[in-house]
Image (spheres, rainbow, N blue to C red):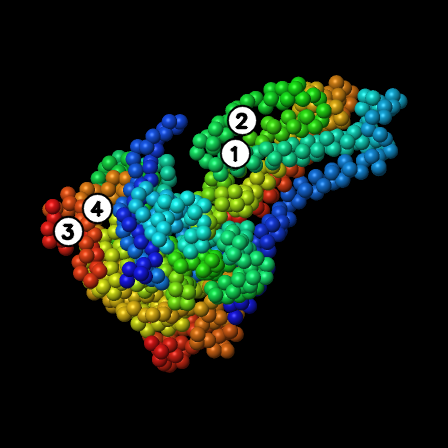
Amino acid sequence: MAVAVETLRPHHTIWGDALIRLRRNRLAVVGVTFILLLALGAMLVPYVSPYPWDRQNYNIILQNPSWAHPFGTDNLGRDVITRLLYGARTSLQVGIFTQIIVVLVGIPIGAIAAAAGGRMDNIIMRFVDVMYAFPDLLLIILVRAILGPSIYMLFLAIGLVAWVNVARLVRGQILSLKQRDFITAARAMGASGPYITLRHLLPNSIGPVIVVLTFNVPRAIFAEAALSYIGIGANTPSWGTMIRDGYEVIFAAPHLVAFPALAVGILMLSFTFLGDGLRDALDPRLRR
Amino acid sequence: MTALLQVRNLSTYFHTQDGVVKAVDGVYYEVAKGETIALVGESGCGKTVSALSILRLIPEPPGKIVSGEVLFEGTDLLKLSQEEMRKVRGAEIAMIFQEPMTSLNPVLTIGRQISEALELHQQMTKQDAYKEALRLLELVGIPQAERRARDYPHQFSGGMRQRVMIAMAISCRPKLLIADEPTTAVDVTIQAQLLELVRGITRELGTSLILITHNLGVVARYARRVYVMYAGRIVEHGTAQAVYHDPQHPYTVGLLSSVPRLDEPRKTHLSTIEGQPPDLIFPPSGCPFHPRCAYAIPKCSKDRPELMEVEPAHYSACWVALQKPTPWKKIS
Amino acid sequence: MEKNILIEVKDLTKYFPITSGLIFQRIVAHVKAVDGVTFSIGKGETLGLVGESGCGKTTVGKCILQLYRPTSGSILFEDKDLCTLSENELRPLRQKLQVIFQDPYESLNPRFTAADIIGEPLRIHGTATGKAYRERVAELLDIVGLAPYMAERYPHEFSGGQRQRLGIARALALQPSFIVCDEPISALDVSIQAQIINLLGTLQDKFGIAYLFISHDLSVVRHISDRVAVMYLGKIMEISDRTELYKSPLHPYTQVLLSAVPIPDPEVEAQHVPIVLKGEVPTPINPPSGCVFHPRCPKAFEPCPTVIPALRDAGGGHQVACLLYSTSWP
């Protein structure tokens, strides 16, 4: 009898359960939809747009939005929406690749500090503190100066600034998880330190890390736009570069600043909505 | 005796991701002036939610009091405005919680916390309120009250914090005190101290007491009447004497016989209630206890029994209890 | 009798240092969690360890399992002193020494399925693989009374009692000879407690496992234990055969504890006046001199604040650490 009662409730895995809760969050769904549409546009733009991103046409400079050029043209007669979608490639790439660097650097460093403990932990975390205190912009300019102006170096530079938060988070998560009885249980079974870290500690700290990574993306996107704006960013089409170029003719053609600025804003907001949704969805406290 | 508090057909539901949890589902109970009653049941049976509903402290959403009346000296508390309700809380009805640390403000000294409530509710001056706070701390047996009043909550032990909570609760001389598992977080010797203290104070001030607990021993020691809750409903109620010696609901029978007793010879095997507590989103049909009940008859899975007077002043929500003698009586 | 001893704890002491200072840490004091505890547990026997929170009973359990390295003393198991072994040397012995925790939610990895949880010890020690592994997991589920279809569920989908059954199945996986049960039922509902107590009893009869049953509930300890030890502030106050201890408790602290337990019967309670102790348990950082219980003891007399009572046999294996029962003191 008791068995029959139990099967009434649907059975979900942890991730399945999180997905259900994420789908109930309207803002998160809006955010994800925008991100996916933008990614799709960025991928397809070479095939659907009639204009290459760099084709200049001096007959149609600084045109307002029209059917032929829905977002208008810039001061060299280039199609703004095409450039915007190419710029989205840069922005999304920056968002994703910097987070890969953050994951590759931040998680191991945080995990090692927490797992080792004692003096090792102390040394690593003081280094992290120094990195944290170091001015981001200065570090990025230094990295760019040393490693050159390639877009990949830009990812690296932004990533090397952003890993610190994740390292701290992972360390904190693991330190608190270490106090839990299931870790004690694993130790009592004779599990080794690396096994406990990889099988128990890291998988259980991954939820908050995903949330922080999602919040990191808009920051990286903004950082790229800002760097491009001051002229040390990407040499490919970039929203930051577009804003800078448009700024020179802002009174003649305000749409040249407005569209890329809007794009930056909406994309950042989308990732923030997604991050908020993920935070609620992945929080195991809501379901117990 | 006149009833100080009457809870009638109270239902409180929670809306969750998985469905509607009927945490409290048509509950009746009453407390007379100066009387101590006990709400007994296991976690999730709705005993705490019903008490929080009395004070309208249910977080809304996800919770909602969907029906019922809470008559306190004849006034329905569920119909009061927020402002009027605030005057009832603390002043007329006070509550002691299980975990005193979370109900104390960590950045205020103990003396300030008590005196602040007095200034608020009793319109006392600052000096008078502080003096009264010291008197209360002494009353609840905190040694060196004057010095300890300047300490912060984290400097108190669990038992001492619970004494502070008691002092705060009685500061406005409420007519009704609700103690929600007041001794679950403390040790047996401290439990004895605290409960003796609460008993002494309620007797002296003539305060009524609702004792919410899962500890059958504590109920036997302190309560005059007992309400047994299961799956959001009262399943049995009567005097402690009657409920313990002639239980009229198989759940009560199961509870009483599953607890090892120090005053009886040791048994080799404890009798148990089989199965797991019900899922309140998908409660069993008919009587919510029937899947675990050793005495269930076909009717039990179809019709939900309401509370019926099966013995004089002894109520049970059980179809089988209508049979005389009850089948469990023959066994024990 | 000697031959049947499984675990022998001798003069076990565990002090936790309290440090101060940000960079140059120095030890300013010690929490004397366990202070010279000696007892033994026979094969297939249950020793109940009772006391109030902070008395050191959980620390004793963790020291036996070497989850805490004791400050001093020895723990003999299978002719080896566990305290002297390295983590690698301990690993094979850990199969024989298992643990069940108080909070069954805290003690299960929320991202593991029931089968992953139960099978983890088998995987760690490489005891069984493939078909044998799956069969053993299924068998363990059955032993603790869970249905086969529950194997793929996650901890949050189980009720408290079922989670505790998972914890028990995990502890049984490697066929241990000894399990530390650390308050295994105090987080469970009353109606579920009896189920788990009965299960622990059945498993002991079936597999001959010895338990150290740590609890603050004296009624439950009486039910499940063969012998009972009472701890207060890191020391054993009294240790005896179960029947003897509950029938004629010698130590004033044991008497107070027993008197404080409310009996679930209003008639009995109406007659019963509990001995209410004054004050609270002192801090283990700076425990009282002499007998640690003397400031609260209703029967303390003049030597108590100065003389530390040793645990002595008061006849028939009933040991008590109280000056009332010692004929002379230095």
- Label 2 crowd (10 A; few <14 / some 14-19 / many >=20): some
Q: Position of residue B246 (x, y in %)?
A: 32, 73
Q: Do the residues labelled 4 and 3 touch (CB within 8 Å)?
A: no
Disc 1 to disc 4, C-alpha distance: 44 Å
Q: Can residue C168 be seen in this view?
A: no
Disc 1 to disc 2, C-alpha distance: 10 Å
Q: Position of residue A127 (x, y in %)?
A: 51, 26
- Residue that mark 2 sits on: A132
Q: Where is residue B65 in the image (x, y as percent from the top left)?
A: 48, 56
Residue at image location 78% in from the left, 37% down from the top = A43
Report the mark closest to the observer, 4 or 3: 3
The local secondary structure at tag 3 comes to helix
Amino acid at dot 2: Tyr
The verdict on a common chain for dots 1 and 4 is no
Amino acid at dot 1: Arg
Q: Are marks 1 and 2 in contact (CB under 8 Å)?
A: yes
Mark linked to residue A168: 1
Q: Relative to residue C30, is residue B319 depicted above or below?
A: below
Q: Relative to residue B96, is residue B135 depicted above or below?
A: above
Mark linked to residue C80: none
- For the N terminus of chain C, the image quarter is bottom left
- Residue that mark 3 sits on: C323
Q: Position of residue A232 (x, y in %)?
A: 69, 20
Amino acid at dot 3: Leu
Residue at image location 47% in from the left, 39% down from the top = A175
Disc 2 to disc 4, C-alpha distance: 50 Å
Does residue B108 appear to the left or right of C130 in the view shown? left
Disc 2 to disc 3, C-alpha distance: 62 Å
- The chain letter under disc 3 is C
- Residue that mark 4 sits on: C292
